[in-house]
Image: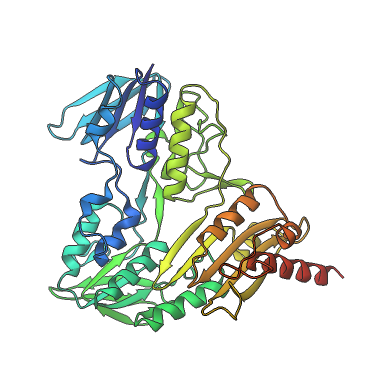
């Protein structure tokens, strides 16, 4: 069997490794238009802050490593797939080094092309002092531009925008965060939590303009001028990071896609064309809190989907469990972790939800130290099923988010969270674990509104 893999970052790399683990003799042809593979873009902020000194360490695989996995593996770097003819099982490829174009046949294909950074329809977004943030080239350009900058504007308040804001604030830069189209981190948390994130940024000297929308960029030799719907803001450079969109044009009108152009796949990562599988940022996840497709470009989703595509392209055997989009963000000395859906987004889906917010110390007050945890639980008022959770604390609550993710996956209720068995030791928690208390608060709230 000849398998073509188009794109080789997280999903593509995971797929190739899995195929060759199971059947090392398989012919695998990988096409990647960059000169590298497997770049961890989620580590860009660490590089810009200086916690990671070498950008090269953000690559966790290379072409030579993949080619050593089997005798019939070829990784074609700087090769751009120009078109895919799904009916004929053909792809057209251009060697970007010499411009030569040729056609290759395949038996099965894995689409792992990833995503583009969203370029907002703002006049002047291509000005030289306005940069985007997605890949290793972007990281290098931002690092170079920021070296002499005193003031840096970040446009966009998602995970990347907040991470870059924090990173630059650690380096002695004056940082301006502009975010107005959507609320701060609104894809992940409700305002009860995002307000605390905003306060944390302000406490560390970040100037936040969270109700302003950038409309126009202008620049001269030294400054960039950002016209918003409120005022003109100035900085030495601006970094735009307002989200991602799936890179799926090669399969337009050939496989089933969602309205946002993300690829729809079945439980085996198989598209509507049985010989084409897809994984990563080009693909919609099966979002368990709503039971629908959702576009959620996260590295965790990409590696999981990539591995499953690598398994199932050899014969459908392992089903995709879907996702809760569980994620975390380190912010100064605090951690934000979340899973599932926010109350605001759930209501937009038409779900009958409620949410409860609880602040509770993670362990007894008689211990030498403790720390409060702000917790928010989103649940279905009719079924009492847990649909989402958000936690923010100086205490490491990341594994609590993972536990709540499993509970959403398993369709557990607030009643089960209230009384599920959890350990007690004063070093770690109270006789009632803080998650038990969160569940009990939700039960009390839900019962009170029913009576």
Residue 253 shows in this picture: no
- Quadrant in the picture for residue 348: bottom right
Classify 56 as above or below 64: below
Image point (30%, 77%), residue name: 175
Q: Residue at x 69, y 65 (%)?
A: 436
The residue closer to the viewer here, 334 or 220, is 334
Nearest the eye: 435 or 376? 435
Image quadrant where one finds the N terminus: top left
The reply to whether residue 92 is visible in this rendering is yes
Q: Quadrant of the C terminus?
A: bottom right
- On screen, residue 332 versus residue 317, left or right, reads left
Q: Which residue is pictured at 32% across the width and 53% down the height?
A: 41
Between residues 361 and 112, which one lies in front from this camera angle? Answer: 361
Residue visible at 34% across and 17% down in the picture:
25
Count of all numbered marks drawn on residues in the image: 0
In this rendering, is residue 269 above or below 390?
Answer: above
Q: Position of residue 335 (x, y in %)?
A: 46, 68
Q: Relative to 17, does residue 397 appear above or below in the rendering? A: below
Q: Quadrant of residue 215?
A: bottom left
Q: Is residue 121 left or right of residue 56?
A: right
């Amino acid at each position: 069997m000849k398998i073509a893999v188009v794109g080789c970052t997280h999903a593509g790399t995971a797929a190739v490794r899995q195929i060759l683990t199971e059947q090392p003799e398989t012919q695998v042809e990988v096409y990647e238009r960059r000169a590298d593979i497997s770049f961890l873009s989620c580590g860009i902020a660490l590089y810009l802050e200086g916690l990671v000194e070498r950008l090269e360490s953000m690559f966790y695989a290379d072409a030579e490593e993949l080619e050593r996995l089997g005798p019939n593996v070829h990784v074609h770097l700087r090769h751009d797939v120009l078109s895919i003819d799904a009916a004929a099982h053909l792809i057209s490829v251009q060697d970007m080094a010499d411009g030569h174009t040729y056609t290759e046949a395949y038996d099965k294909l894995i689409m792992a092309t990833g995503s583009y950074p969203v370029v907002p329809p703002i006049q002047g977004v291509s000005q030289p002092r306005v940069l985007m943030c997605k890949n290793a080239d972007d990281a290098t350009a931002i690092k170079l531009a920021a070296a002499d900058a005193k003031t840096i504007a970040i446009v966009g308040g998602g995970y990347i925008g907040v991470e870059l804001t924090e990173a630059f604030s650690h380096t002695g830069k004056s940082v301006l965060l502009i975010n107005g189209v959507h609320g701060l981190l609104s894809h992940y948390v409700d305002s009860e939590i995002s307000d605390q994130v905003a306060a944390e940024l302000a406490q560390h000297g970040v100037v936040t303009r969270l109700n302003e929308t950038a409309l126009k960029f202008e620049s001269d030799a030294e400054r960039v001028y950002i016209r918003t719907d409120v005022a003109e803001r100035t900085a030495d450079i601006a970094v735009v990071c307002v989200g991602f969109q799936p890179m799926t044009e090669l399969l337009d009108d050939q496989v089933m896609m969602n309205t946002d152009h993300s690829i729809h796949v079945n439980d085996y990562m198989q598209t509507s064309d049985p010989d084409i599988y897809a994984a990563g940022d080009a693909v919609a996840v099966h979002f368990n809190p709503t039971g629908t497709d959702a576009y959620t470009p996260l590295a965790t989703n990409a590696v999981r989907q990539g591995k499953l595509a690598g398994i199932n392209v050899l014969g459908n055997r392992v089903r995709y469990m879907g996702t809760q989009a569980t994620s975390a963000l380190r912010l100064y000395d605090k951690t934000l972790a979340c899973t599932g859906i926010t109350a605001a987004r759930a209501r937009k889906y038409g779900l009958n939800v409620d949410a409860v917010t609880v602040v509770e110390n993670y362990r007894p007050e008689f211990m030498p130290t403790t720390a409060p945890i702000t917790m928010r639980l989103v649940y279905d008022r009719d079924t009492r099923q847990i649909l989402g959770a958000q936690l923010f604390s100086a205490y490491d609550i990341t594994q609590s988010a993972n536990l709540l993710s499993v509970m959403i996956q398993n369709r557990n209720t607030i009643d089960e969270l209230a009384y599920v068995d959890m350990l007690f030791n004063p070093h770690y928690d109270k006789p009632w674990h803080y998650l038990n208390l969160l569940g009990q608060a939700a039960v009390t709230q839900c019962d009170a509104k029913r009576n």
